Image: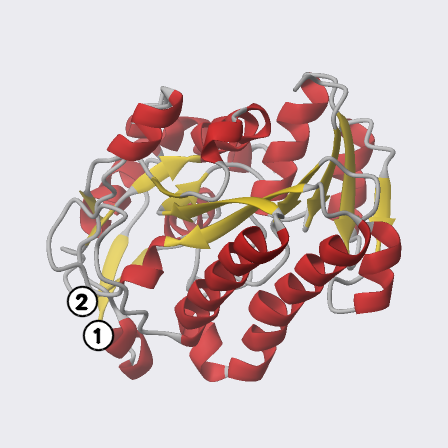
Amino acid sequence: MNNKENILILGGLGFIGKNLYRRLSEEHFKVTILADRITPEDEEFLIAGKGKNVIQGNVLDGSFMERTIAGYDVIFCLAGHSGASDSVKDPCQDLNANLNGHLNVLEACRKSNVGARLIFPSTRLVYGKPLKNPVNESHSLNPESIYAINKLTAEYYYRLYHRVYGIRSVIFRISNPFGPYQKFGSNHYGILNWFINKAVSGQPLEIYGDGSQQRDFLYVDDLVDVFRRSIESRAMDGKIYNIGYGIGISLREAAERVARNVPGTRITYKPWPEIDQKIETGDYISDIRLIQADTGWKPQTDFEEGVRKTIEYYGRR
């Protein structure tokens, strides 16, 4: 493959989508974004990045997707909502956003673009509470939130359409990405970005419990690099990969590092909310040996460097 490939990013104005669009545009791929709404902040991003190919529509509209999806060689299926706690509070919304939409995408490809290559970002939450760390792809699956259940079900949809209809797909179980372009509506997803946003805004960083639980934080440029490689590597078709930094860092340590880089930042501790405590999965560290073996990929951005870059970005906003 080469940069003449025609690429569609579903949910291309979200956190990961914007970072991916920026990278692919810089490499002169022909990239189109599909988004259900365009905010003033999104318009600013598109103007700055000279983004011209934008389609406004909703993946929940099956007939629209069937008309729209034909002609694309590679489709990044990023549309959806994040947030395990939020999904428990509003399960029907999560069902639509994180399951029904993906089924529409697959059906549209089956009917009008069976040759497309689909990249689906799943989540490390499909494993539930790890039995041991680091977690590899053969670990048992025990999702403990509506969000994780729907992500896992969507994985099975992608695998089924790959096996039955020959629609090529790659599934990434992603840890905890952070970096520029996060939209802030809740602290229930993107916790490190949330910490950084609070710090540069002069607000305290709130941690539930003692903050000892470890997370696998991955700078978004490294995640985008995996997506970029997936365009060219046919050996990845039909496979599932863990994507993460491969090193565990506690929430307490992550908050302390943010505070060191934003002088005057306070860290506070509060009791766990009931729902959050019930769906908390504990320590998680990705075993990334499989993706390394198949593609040679490994994270290039040191955690401290990623934190500094992200603080610099949000400090300019």
Left of 146 or right of it: where is 252?
A: left
- Residue 88: x and y in percent read 43, 80
| Location of the N terminus (image quadrant) | top right
Residue 128 figure quarter: bottom left
| Location of the C terminus (image quadrant) | top right
Which type of secondary structure does the marked residue at label 1 adopt? loop
Residue 46 figure quarter: top right
Report the residue marked by disc 1.
Answer: 271
Report the residue marked by disc 2.
Answer: 209
Left of 54 or right of it: where is 59?
A: left
Q: How crowded is mark 1: few (under 14 residues within 10 Å), some or many (20 or more)?
A: few
Residue 17 appears in the figure: yes
Q: Residue at x 46, y 42 (%)?
A: 200
Which type of secondary structure does the marked residue at label 2 adopt? loop
Left of 13 or right of it: where is 290?
A: left
Which of disc 2 and disc 1 is earlier in sequence? 2
Q: Residues within 10 Å of mark 2 (few under 14, many from 20)?
A: some
Query: Could you tell me the amino acid type at mark 1?
Result: Pro
Query: Could you tell me the amino acid type at mark 2?
Result: Gly
- Residue 41: x and y in percent read 74, 46
CB within 8 Å, label 1 to label 2:
yes
**In the image shown, does 122 or 193 lie closer to the viewer?**
122
**In the image shown, does 63 or 178 lie closer to the viewer?**
63
Q: Which residue is drawn at 25% across and 31% down?
A: 289
